[in-house]
Image: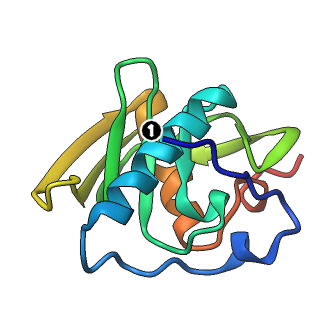
Amino acid sequence: MAIRQLRYVGDPILRKKSREVTDINDRIKILLDDMLETMYKNDGVGLAAPQVGILKRVVVIDIGEGPIKLINPEIISMEGEVIDVEGCLSVPGETGEVKRPSKVKVKYLDENGKELIIQGTGLLARALCHEIDHLNGILFIDRVIKK
């Protein structure tokens, strides 16, 4: 495993839409492991591939309950809304209040290519939405509630 270089706000790759993963090969599995190591080293709870310069629909999350690796994640349902403070490894030093669903259901592939569904509430729901936004070129600062 290796620590990958983070990309920061202003880097054009963060504004591009990521491509779907069509072949879950060793390179994708290494990317997932490297992303986890990079996320942990930087004290994050989530990391999307564009944040390390790779335009693939790959996300890792760990809200303190163990790592989750998601390939081609897609939100299939959302409920409720919660406003809370967010930050981002790609936007260091900035936080802001963002409205997110209180509950989400996400369909994804695991690293073995098996289709799974994860349901998240609270921080997990927020992290799923935040990281999937990255795959679509959206940063949390685009969603901050203006006061």
Residue 25 at least partly seen: yes
Q: Residue at x 35, y 19 (%)?
A: 65
Quadrant for residue 13, please give it: bottom right
Please tell me which residue lies in front, 29 or 86. 29
Query: Could you tell me residue 67's position as x and y percent?
Result: 36, 31
Residue occupied by mark 1: 61
**Front one among 129 and 93:** 93
Q: Viewer-proximal residue, 124 or 18?
A: 18
Horizontal relation, residue 41 to residue 110: left or right: right
Instruction: Give the left or right position of residue 82, taking residue 6 as reference.
Output: left
Mark 1 is on which residue type?
Ile
Task: Report helix, strand or loop for mark 1.
Answer: strand
Q: Of all residues shown, which one is farthest toward the top?
A: 64
Vertical placement of residue 58 versus 22, above or below: above
| Residue drawn 76% across the image and 50% down it | 90
Spot occupied by residue 40 in the image (x, y as percentages of width and height) = 58, 28
Q: Is residue 72 visible?
A: no
122, above or below 100, in the image: above
Considering every residue shown, the one lying at the far left of the view is 114
Displayed quadrant of residue 106: bottom left
In x, y percent, where is residue 63?
Answer: 46, 25
Looking at the image, residue 116 sits to the left or right of residue 137; the answer is left
**Colour scheme used in the picture?**
rainbow
Percent of width and height locating residue 107 = 22, 58
Callout 1: few (<14), some (14-19), or many (20+) C-alpha neighbours within 10 Å? many
- Seen from the viewer's position, the closer of residues 123 and 59 is 59
- 128 versus 41 height, above or below: below
Number of marks present in the image shown: 1
* Residue at the image point whose x is 38% and y is 64% from the top: 27
Q: Is residue 118 left or right of residue 8?
A: left
